[in-house]
Amino acid sequence: MAFCSNSVVHYSSCCITSNTATRSSFVPVSSFKCGSNGIRVSSKFRIVAKSNSDAQVTQEQSTTPSSVLSFLCPLLKLLSGGDPSRPRNATLELATSSIASMSRFAWGTKSIAESSPNNEIPSNLPINLQLFEFEACPFCRRVREALTELDLSVEVYPCPKGSVRHREVVRRTGGKEQFPFLIDKKSGISIYESGDIVECLFEQYGEGRSPSFGLLESTVFTGWMPTILRAGRGMTLWEHSTPDPPPGKLELFSYENNPNARIVREALCELELPYILQNVGEGSHRMKLLLDAYGSKEVPYFIDHSTGFQSGDYKVILSYLFDTYSTVIL
C-alpha cells in the first residue's frame, strides 16, 4: 500500500487556539479510549512528519492564514446575526449559501469515481477515516471537497473555536491544535496540512486519479469566500451546546458544495456534534443508500439513530438539533 508523500503545500491549515477547559471526556467511535485520567489515544497511529526544515517553513507560512482567520473570528461573529438557534431569514440563508457554493465552482460537487450497478457500497461497510475540522475553515473545506470527489465516507469530529471535546483529542494525538487533522485507521496514519491530506487521500483511495484541476491551488484565492459570505457560521461553539456527546450515531448524507447541506454542517459544528458524513455527490456509489433511506437523491438527509429522527428539510433539521442538543429550553 502506498503511503503519503511529504511535499510541502503552502497555506494549508487553520490554527486557532482556545483556552477553554475541557468539560467532559470525548467518547470515541473506535480508536480512542477514555480512562479515569482523561483521554488516552491509541498508539497505533503514527504522525506523518516532514523534515525539520520543511516543518519550519510550513509553520512560518501558516502564520498568515492563521492570523487572518483569528482576526475574522470576532468580526464574522458580529456580522452573523448572533445566536444560531434563533429563527433565521430563510431567503438570506439560502442566498448566501448558494453564492458561497458558486464561489467554489464545481469543486466538492461530483464524485470522480466510476459508478456502476456492480460497485454500489454496502450500508455496513466500516468507515476508516476520522476528520477533525471546523466548517468555516477554508483548508478543511479543501479536504471535504476531496472527500466528495473520492466518494468517501468519514467520521467528522467538529472542532469549533471554544471546543470542549475534540480539540483536546487533536492536541493529545498530534501534539498541536491545527486543522484539518486526519486519522486513517486502515493505514495507521495521522496527518496535518490540508494539501498533504488531499494528496494522501488520492494516493490511498484515488486508484491512480488526481484531484480535479485547481482544487488544491484555488483554496488560497476563493476558499475564503464561503467563510466570509456565511459570516463565520460553523466557526465558534454555541454557548448553550450540551457538553456531552450524543448518545448514539448521527448520520448526514451530503456533498460539500450543496447550499442546504452546508447550513446543517455549520450547525453540527457549532454544537460540536460528531457525525458520520456520507458523501453523495453526483455519480456517487452511495446514492442507492440515500434512495433506500429517503426515497430521493436530494440532500441534506439527516438521521439521529438514538432518537429515530430523520429529515431532508434543512430548516427542520436545524430546529431539531438546537432543541435536542442544548442546555436551555428554546
Image (cartoon, grey):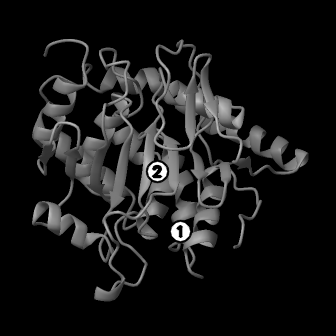
In terms of depth relative to the viewer, which is nearer, 95 or 206?
Answer: 206
The span from disc 2 to disc 1 (Cα, nearest Å) is: 14 Å
The answer, for residue 177, to whether it is visible in the render is no
Q: Residues within 10 Å of mark 2 (few under 14, many from 20)?
A: many
Look at the image and tell me in which quarter the N terminus lies: bottom right
**According to the image, label 2 marks what residue?**
141
Counting residues from the start of the chain, the first of labels 2 and 1 encountered is 2
Residue 63 percent across, percent down from the top left: 69, 35
Splitting the image into 4 quarters, where does residue 105 fall?
Answer: bottom left
Residue at (34, 58) in percent of width and height: 278
At mark 2, the secondary structure is: helix
Quick check: marks 2 and 1 in contact, CB under 8 Å? Answer: no
Residue at (56, 19) in percent of width and height: 18
Residue at (23, 37) in percent of width and height: 306
Say above or below: 203 vs 221: below
Q: Residue flagged by tag 2: what amino acid is it?
A: Arg
Say above or below: 21 vs 57: above
Q: Residue flagged by tag 1: what amino acid is it?
A: Gly
The answer, for residue 284, to whether it is visible in the render is yes
Residue 238 percent across, percent down from the top left: 33, 21
In terms of depth relative to the viewer, which is nearer, 129 or 6?
Answer: 129
**According to the image, label 1 marks what residue?**
214
